């Protein structure tokens, strides 16, 4: 029994799915669409939830998955072409796409988290660190500048010439280098100063470097996906026929380039070898011989002329001799030719007779042989008769025997006659054959003699021609011996211009002629005794040049020209043509190895024999536009996968992600921190926290303020949970006043989103929560004026019952005391309007109360008890109602035991206003007293800076303090907060006073004057010891010091501020000179050095 082939089954499933994927997808979609139970039902519910919760994120996720599937298919198709294993290709493609999509999501999340992250170390560098960094930076810039100058040959440093400078190039390089340096400086400065353009890019680079592992993983996966997807796309849009045509075109083009390079390289090497030839020792030695000959020939013109005349006469005699030899040879050839004709005719005649003679001889020979056989037979018959063996069988020589002997004698005679005839025929045949052989020998001898004579004539003619050529060449020199030396020099120059074998031979000939002429003359013989014209050393030195010359000739004859390569149409023929051209070129092994490697590469990368990878890569390198299109498609799809993951992670971005924080947290982590604080009742807690926030002037990104003192204890506890969570992520900051917190806009925005989400996703629960909140409000109103006692009265008359439709208790109005009947009835009426109280139809004195109403009443009573126990009964939360009007809130803490809210105009001030005269001075004094009390200051503080000179100096000192605060983030934040509180208190006081005199324009005008005067002098009054500004600034710095968050400069600033605070308390502030001294001290505080920070950030570590 054969085994079960799992791989074959899986491959079959994959093949079926790839062929019918549309039907499979349609079936899956129908199951999800119409199924309400099971896994498909859960998938449908999940899709519906995703679309309703965040359809943008769902669309991005779906897009990313769809693009990943598309990229996975092309990757699988390309992998399958390489591995030939569909199952393996599926696994690899799934891994590549999964890693790429997840890493793209992680990269997007790293950007979403890291763009709001700030460094956790806020300490400044020391002076030594800054100096070392500056020196290292200057050294680096100098080294780079010198390297660039050296690379562009603007400066050069050599051992012998020293430093050499090309000032034109130096100026050009300097300008470009300075431009680049200034541009980089502007980018760095803009980033340092918090530029809106440069800072995000610098932050992005930091994040990329920090998450380099993720980028390496993504780029590796994307490279693999792009490569195999490119192969799939390219095979789909570029058919095999086009690939074959492109391969032929590429091979022809490459081979043309190789052949051209062979010719160019051979020419180059020939020139190089020719130049180096004249530097070799062999040529120098030969050239020395030539120079010696030229020098020795000077002044020997007569001897040379006589030599050439003698040579000419000898050549003429030689010509005459050769002509005589030619004549003799021609006459001998004529006789031999006639003899050859006669012999040839005789030979032809004899050859014609020989066949008949041979036939005759053969006939006679056969007849002779037959007679010899007959004689032998008769002899045997006679012997047999004699012995009695045959015949008569009688022994002895009887008549028969004698008859046999007579016949034998006759046959012997006939044999002898036939033998003579055979000999005659043989003799005639031998005679003819002997004569034929003799004639052939004679003809051969004649032919040899004729060839010899003809050779002698040809040799003589050639020698005559050679002599004539020499005569023609030396025609001028024999008459003018002075031209012998120029001819010799021309031969030397010609060889130097183009060293080849012909010119070397001509040079040797000229040298030999001149040397022979001088050697033949007794007067010059001794001069040239040591001179040798044999160029054996020069020929050895020039052997490489001569080989390259021969190679160039062969190359031009066999390879150069387009018609040569056009004859070869196949790849094999082209490669063979290239190798032949390489062999003919005469290049050395090193050069030929390089060209051979190119030919081998062409052969190995042939499309008709190479791997698919090589075929695809060849098309890409050929500049095939379809290949580029395939690559763009592959990169585009994978880039869209990356963008979908990136934007998908950004779509999950929360408003809390914009909160600056030294610790990197994802949007999910940030939301989880706040959402955990909002549990269990998310909607109500978020709504309560949002409603507890008050707007304020933005200070370092903090736009809201929360005062827990304004809330009842239960609400304050719930809001405090959210504030604690916000402080964990840096969205909440505690001020120097107890129970007061600053809240960033991002937290407010997130709470609004939470409320909106709860209203959208849980409409029934949120609606019920709103109804319960309204129930609590209505119950509080119904319980007035004595909230706690009325709540006790209602609760103590409740009777528990079995729960029915949420109603868990009942009350009988007959049991309620008369003094509590009316407030109890108010509670029941209010509850009935909110469907938490039902009246019994059978018993009109009985009312059923819902469990929520009981909880609400119990909560109101508990809050009232807590409020009374804290001694701070608030109107809004069931505090004691009285005739006193609430005061305007103060901007400081600690001046009054009941807080700043107690220092507004009370009813006592209002009564006094009614009794006071309506004069302007009295109104102004009353307004000044009221507003100054609200600010926590006395009127004497206003009068202390009333003098114009003092006021001017005091305001100048306050302005100097503001200038200092701009350079220190902690001081700036604290000062802005104090100013915002003071403005708020001032506006509230003005509003309440204006409301009290709304019908009197004159009083409102006086009020505006007083408010303007106080607002103008308020910064100066805050510097007074009574104002407490210096105390708060010092306290803020001391808090930072206790938490070890101060830099070195801020430590110095704290010491100077503490000293200045003591001096202010000891000064006579009624003297303008003292205020000028304060201003100088303020200016000296700047010497502590500013802290670097980004404007409007509020997230740097040094926060006070």
Image (cartoon, grey):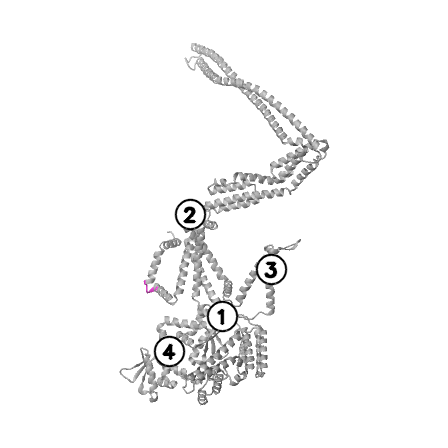
- What is the CA distance from the residue labelled 1 to the residue labelled 4? 35 Å
Per the image, the residue denoted by label 3 is 143
Which type of secondary structure does the marked residue at label 4 adopt?
A: helix
| In this rendering, the label closer to the viewer, 1 or 3 | 3
Number of marks in the rendered image: 4
Nearest to N terminus: mark 4 or mark 3: 3
> CB under 8 Å between callouts 1 and 3?
no
Nearest to N terminus: mark 2 or mark 3: 3
Q: Mainly helix, strand or loop, the magenta region?
A: loop
In this view, 852 is above or below 187: below
In this view, 281 is above or below 771: above
- What is the CA distance from the residue labelled 1 to the residue labelled 3? 38 Å
Q: Does the stretch in magenta take in 949?
A: no
Per the image, the residue denoted by label 1 is 661
Q: Report the disc number at residue 773.
A: 4
Q: Range of the magenta residues? A: 34-38
Per the image, the residue denoted by label 2 is 240
């Amino acid at each position: 029994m054969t085994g079960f082939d799992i791989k074959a089954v899986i491959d079959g499933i994959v093949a079926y799915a790839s062929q019918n994927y549309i039907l499979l997808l349609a079936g899956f979609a129908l199951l999800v669409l119409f199924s309400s139970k099971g896994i498909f039902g859960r998938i449908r519910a999940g899709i519906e939830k995703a679309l309703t919760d965040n359809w943008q994120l769902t669309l991005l996720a779906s897009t990313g998955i769809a693009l990943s599937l598309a990229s996975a298919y092309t990757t699988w198709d390309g992998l399958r072409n390489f591995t030939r294993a569909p199952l393996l290709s599926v696994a690899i493609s799934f891994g590549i796409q999964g890693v790429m999509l997840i890493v793209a999501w992680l990269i997007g999340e790293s950007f979403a988290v890291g763009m709001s992250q700030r460094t956790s170390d806020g300490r400044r560098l020391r002076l030594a660190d800054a100096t070392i960094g500056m020196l290292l930076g200057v050294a680096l810039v100098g080294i780079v500048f010198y390297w660039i100058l050296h690379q562009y040959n603007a400066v050069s440093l050599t051992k012998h010439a020293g430093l050499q400078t090309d000032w034109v190039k130096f100026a050009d390089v300097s300008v470009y280098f300075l431009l680049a340096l200034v541009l980089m400086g502007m980018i760095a400065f803009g980033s340092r100063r918090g530029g809106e353009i440069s800072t995000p890019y610098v932050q992005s680079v930091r994040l990329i470097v920090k998450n380099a592992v993720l980028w390496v993983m993504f780029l590796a996966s994307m490279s693999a996906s792009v490569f195999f997807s490119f192969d799939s796309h390219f095979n789909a849009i570029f058919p095999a026929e086009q690939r074959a045509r492109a391969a032929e075109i590429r091979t022809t083009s490459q081979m043309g380039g190789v052949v051209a390079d062979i010719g160019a390289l051979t020419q180059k090497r020939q020139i190089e070898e020719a130049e180096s030839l004249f530097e070799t020792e062999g040529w120098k030695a030969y050239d020395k011989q030539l120079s010696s000959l030229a020098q020795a020939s000077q002044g020997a013109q007569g001897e040379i002329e006589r030599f050439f005349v003698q040579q000419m006469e000898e050549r003429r005699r030689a010509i005459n001799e050769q002509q005589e030899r030619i004549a003799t040879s021609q006459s001998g050839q004529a006789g031999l030719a006639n003899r050859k004709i006669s012999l040839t005719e005789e030979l032809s005649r004899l050859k014609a007779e020989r066949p008949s003679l041979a036939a005759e001889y053969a006939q006679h020979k056969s007849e002779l042989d037959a007679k010899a056989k007959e004689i032998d037979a008769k002899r045997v018959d006679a012997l047999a008769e004699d012995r009695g063996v045959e015949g008569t069988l009688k022994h002895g020589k009887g008549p028969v025997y004698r008859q046999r002997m007579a016949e034998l004698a006759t046959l012997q005679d006939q044999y002898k006659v036939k033998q003579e005839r055979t000999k005659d025929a043989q003799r005639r045949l031998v005679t003819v054959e002997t004569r034929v052989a003799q004639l052939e020998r004679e003809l051969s001898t004649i032919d040899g003699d004729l060839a010899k004579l003809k050779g002698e004539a040809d040799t003589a003619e050639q020698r005559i021609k050679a002599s004539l050529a020499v005569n023609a060449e030396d025609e001028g020199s024999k008459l003018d011996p002075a031209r012998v030396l120029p001819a010799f020099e021309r031969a030397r120059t010609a060889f130097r211009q183009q060293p080849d074998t012909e010119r070397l031979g001509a040079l040797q000939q000229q040298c030999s002629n001149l040397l022979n002429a001088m050697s033949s003359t007794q007067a010059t013989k001794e001069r040239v005794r040591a001179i040798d014209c044999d160029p054996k050393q020069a020929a050895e030195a020039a052997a490489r040049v001569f080989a390259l010359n021969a190679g160039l000739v062969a190359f031009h004859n066999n390879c150069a020209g387009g018609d040569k390569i056009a004859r070869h149409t196949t790849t094999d023929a082209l490669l063979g043509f290239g190798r032949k051209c390489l062999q003919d070129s005469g290049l050395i092994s090193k050069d030929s190895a390089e060209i051979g490697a190119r030919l081998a590469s062409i052969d190995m990368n042939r499309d008709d024999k190479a791997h698919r990878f090589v075929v695809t890569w060849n098309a890409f390198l050929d500049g095939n536009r379809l290949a580029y299109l395939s690559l763009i498609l592959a990169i585009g799809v994978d880039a869209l996968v990356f963008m979908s993951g990136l934007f998908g992670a950004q779509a999950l971005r929360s408003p809390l992600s914009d909160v600056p924080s030294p610790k990197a947290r994802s949007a999910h982590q940030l939301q989880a921190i706040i959402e955990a604080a909002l549990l269990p009742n998310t909607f109500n807690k978020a709504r309560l926290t949002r409603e507890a926030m008050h707007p304020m002037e933005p200070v370092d990104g903090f736009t809201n303020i929360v005062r827990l003192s304004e809330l009842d204890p239960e609400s304050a506890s719930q809001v405090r949970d959210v504030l604690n969570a916000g402080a964990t992520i840096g969205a909440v900051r505690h001020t120097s006043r107890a129970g007061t917190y600053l809240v960033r806009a991002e937290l407010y925005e997130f709470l609004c989103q939470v409320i909106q989400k709860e209203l959208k996703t849980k409409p029934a629960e949120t609606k019920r929560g709103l109804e319960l909140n309204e129930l609590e409000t209505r119950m509080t109103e119904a319980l007035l004026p004595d909230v706690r006692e009325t709540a006790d009265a209602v609760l103590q008359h409740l009777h528990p019952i079995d729960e029915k439709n949420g109603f868990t208790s009942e009350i009988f109005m007959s049991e309620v005391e008369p003094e509590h009947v009316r407030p109890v009835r108010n509670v029941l009426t209010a509850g009935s309007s909110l469907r938490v109280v039902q009246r019994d139809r059978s018993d009109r004195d009985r009312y059923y109360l819902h469990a929520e109403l009981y909880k609400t009443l119990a909560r109101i009573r508990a809050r009232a008890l807590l409020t009374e126990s804290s001694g701070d009964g608030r109107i809004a939360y069931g505090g004691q109602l009285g005739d006193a009007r609430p005061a305007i809130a103060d901007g400081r803490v600690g001046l009054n035991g009941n807080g700043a809210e107690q220092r507004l105009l009370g009813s006592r001030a209002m009564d006094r206003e009614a009794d006071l005269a309506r004069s302007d001075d009295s109104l102004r004094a009353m307004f000044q007293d009221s507003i100054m009390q609200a600010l926590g200051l006395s009127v004497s503080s206003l009068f202390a800076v009333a003098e114009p000179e003092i006021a001017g100096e005091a305001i100048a000192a306050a302005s100097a303090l503001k200038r200092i605060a701009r350079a220190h983030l902690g001081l700036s934040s604290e000062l802005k907060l104090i100013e915002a509180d003071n403005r708020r208190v001032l506006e509230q006081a003005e509003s309440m006073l204006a409301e009290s005199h709304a019908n009197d324009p004159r009083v409102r005008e006086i009020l505006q004057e007083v408010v303007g005067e106080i607002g103008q002098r308020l910064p100066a009054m805050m510097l007074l010891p009574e104002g407490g500004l210096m105390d708060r600034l010092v306290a803020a710095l001391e808090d930072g010091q206790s938490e070890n968050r101060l830099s070195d400069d801020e430590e110095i600033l704290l010491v100077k501020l503490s000293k200045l605070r003591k001096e202010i308390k000891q000064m006579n502030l009624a003297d303008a000179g003292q205020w000028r001294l304060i201003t100088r001290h303020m200016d000296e505080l700047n010497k502590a050095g500013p802290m670097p920070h980004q404007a409007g950030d509020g997230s740097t570590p040094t926060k006070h």
